Amino acid sequence: MKKIFSKRNFIKFVFVTMILSSVFVTIRMIMAPTVASFYNPDVRVKSDYFLMLLQCILGTFAMLLPGFTEKRLKVNIPTNMIFVYSAFLYCAIYLGEVKNFYYRIPNWDMILHTFSGAMIGALGFTVISFLNKTEKVPIYLTPVFVAFFSFCFAVTVGVVWEFYEYAADGLLGTNMQKFGTENGTLFVGHYALSDTMADLLVDCIGAFAMSVIGYISIKYDKNWHEKLMFKRKIN
């Protein structure tokens, strides 16, 4: 008897969830007021749902990215990696934005940044593996260097993501960097920077943890990291 829950079924579930969430948010946006009432300032308005809809649409296209990458780059992406990637999108977009976990669950944003740091760190091992497999300049890379590259790659992606959040907050009026409360009250001074610095810190923690795991895997031939690495298709 085929299992109901499997990694592939979960990936499909997340994709369908993104589509249904887009429909749900669109309906709520149509029904929502344009401006919040004085007596109920915490109610979500059309602009809130528009930004949420944008996230859901981006999440839907993000779910198509692994398949596009496989065809474009002629690689095989392990189901384990797609499963981890899908779980992150589900937690970040559906639970975080639609279900409002960013405000309802303490440190939800920090948990996701730690998770993403480790996930991008795992991707870093794939990147350096592909760059190293060249016939023009054969180079032997030590496990320490590979792990260090993975760490730096993940941290750099984390920094670029903070640039994206800063730009989105300025251009679209979002609160991705959590410089204020849910009702719009702005934080003042040093506290306004705490979310960004905390995100970068936990990015480093997640990336470091994955780098250590990858180092041990390579150094002692455990092959743990290969379960998440892309593989070139053999013609």
Image (cartoon, rainbow, N blue to C red):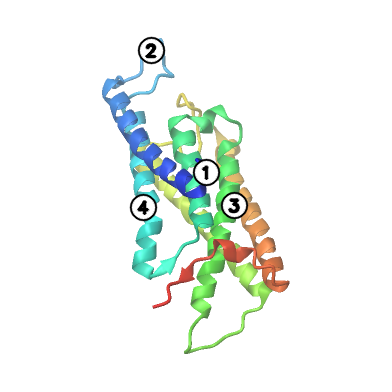
Q: CA distance from mark 4 to mark 3?
A: 25 Å
Disc on the earlier residue, 4 or 3: 4
**Residue ID at (29%, 26%):** 27
| SS assignment at label 4 | helix
Q: Which residue is mark 4?
A: 64
Disc on the earlier residue, 3 or 1: 1
Q: Label 4 amino acid? A: Leu
Q: Label 2 amino acid? A: Phe
- Name the disc covering residue 204, or none: none
Q: Which residue is mark 3?
A: 203
Q: CA distance from mark 4 to mark 1?
A: 24 Å
Q: Which residue is mark 2?
A: 38
The single residue placed furthest to the top in the displayed view is 39
Labels 3, 1: front one: 1
Q: Label 1 amino acid? A: Lys
| SS assignment at label 3 | helix
| SS assignment at label 1 | loop
Disc on the earlier residue, 3 or 2: 2
The single residue placed furthest to the front in the displayed view is 1
Q: CA distance from mark 3 to mark 2?
A: 39 Å
> x, y percentage for residue 225?
61, 64
Q: CA distance from mark 3 to mark 1?
A: 35 Å
Dividing the picture into quadrants, the one containing residue 129 is bottom right
> x, y percentage for residue 185?
48, 26
Q: Label 3 amino acid? A: Asp
